[in-house]
Amino acid sequence: MLRHFTRFHTVAFWCTCVYVFLVHNQMWTRDGAYASDTAGHANYVLQPGQAELSGYSLLHTICGVFYGLPNVAEANHFMIAAGVMTLLLAGAFYHSLLLVHGYWTEKYPGATGSRIPVLTVTAFVVSMILLVPWVHSAYLGVFTGNPWHNPTYSFARVFAIGAVLAFLRLTDPEKAAAGISVTGYLVLATAATLSAWSKPSFMLTLGPTFGLVALLAWLRGKMTWTQVWRLAACLVPTVVVVLIIRQKIFAHPGASNAVVIRPGLVWGHYASSYALALAFGAGFPLYVAAVRWRSISPGLFVGLVNWVVSALVFYLFAEDGSRALHANFAWSYMGGLFFFFLFAMEEWFLRSTTDRTWLRWVGLALFVAHGLSGLRYLLIILGGGSYL
């Protein structure tokens, strides 16, 4: 057990080293070699209070604390902010791997060999299908659950993973029957709040998802009303954080943009076909959900509901003004894709099945296509290419 645990820590360490190399290049490479906003987020730390450019994220706040401590020459300010941010992002990525691996290892103790470690690493690489030659501006057309160019997304994701896993534990009938301590609710409340503070995109969809899933469970007699209101109370701090960030970014006197409802404005600008965008972006999890619908697991059901909610958020909402086509609500959709893939992989490769052979081969082919596409996408970025 200890040897297996140590071995995955080694894998997670080297994966994190690759990620740190990428962050370092994105932080210091100039002249648009990377179309990344990583360096811009480090600069936010150096420019507090400048309206829309002010850093709202927990990531900026922590970096700002370290940036304010040393008494160094002005030329070193960016280096300090960049160094601290790189360390924080490395820690978030490393612990994201450990959270997913630990969840699957605990839930499936009979899974032997390298299945869980391989699936864990792959969950952070899979992407939209890019192997087809006629998809030119693929990223903008279909998006991915594993973007590599935005630091607040990577930092917020580790807390979002913790929130989702805590929610699944709190809504598990067997664990609920055995009794759930206050600690479980505190973990959910803390993880959800930190995720929203780091980047609201995940909790914009996970909050409604938790509410819908809990409501359906209560209507079916799977949860008590006491459990439902306790879950709702856990999300109150998250709502407060989101409202504060909204006030800071959109509602202050100097704001030049606002959130508006414009169905299809942004997504339709970047995708020629919604059907192709959905198929290339979520082909494998959609296939798994369709095949396993009659025996769908709680995790995949949460992933499916969250994906639907995230797609609606991206389709319906936009920003007006100069940021109208920046696709900032796409971050919610990308977070939805990540969890949809995560639980579809669990459903397909870790749960026992009686599916016909040809169904399993089709699912495997789709998964391989997503996996190879994600690897190709990562290699392009590591080589200095743009995420577009």
Image (cartoon, rainbow, N blue to C red):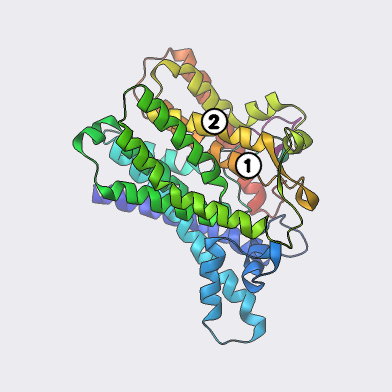
Q: Position of residue 19 (x, y in %)?
A: 54, 56
Front-most of residues 324 and 242: 242
- Mark count: 2
Residue 376 is tagged as 1
Residue at figure coordinates x 49%, y 63% from the top left:
88
The residue labelled by disc 2 is 368
Using a 10 Å C-alpha cutoff, classify the residue at mark 1 as few (fewer than 14 neighbours), some (14 to 19) or many (20 or more): some
Q: Position of residue 181 (x, y in %)?
A: 24, 46
Q: Is residue 149 above or below residue 104?
A: below
Q: CA distance from mark 1 to mark 2?
A: 12 Å
Answer with the quarter of the image where residue 134 lies: top right
**Magenta region includes residue 334:** no
Q: Amino acid at mark 1?
A: Arg
Q: Could you tell me which residue is drawn at 64 percent across and 28 percent down?
A: 278
Of residues 81 and 265, the one nearer the viewer is 265
Majority secondary structure in the magenta region: loop
Count neighbours of disc 2 (C-alpha within 10 A) and say few if under 14, some if 14 to 19, many if 20 or more.
Answer: some
- Residue at position x 30%, y 33% from top? 172
* Residue 335 versus residue 251 in the image, above or below: above
> Does residue 309 sit above or below 252 in this rendering?
above
Amino acid type at circle 2 is Val
286 to the left or right of 184:
right
Q: Which mark is residue 78?
A: none
Tell whether position 135 is magenta. Answer: yes
- Near-viewer residue (250 or 342): 250
- What residue lies at 50% left-to-right and 30% top-to-bottom? 305
- Would residue 142 be visible to someone looking at this image? no
- Is 257 positioned to the left or the right of 80 in the image? right
Which secondary structure, mark 2? helix
Q: Secondary structure at mark 1?
A: helix
x and y percent of residue 20 in the render? 54, 60
Magenta stretch? Answer: 128-138
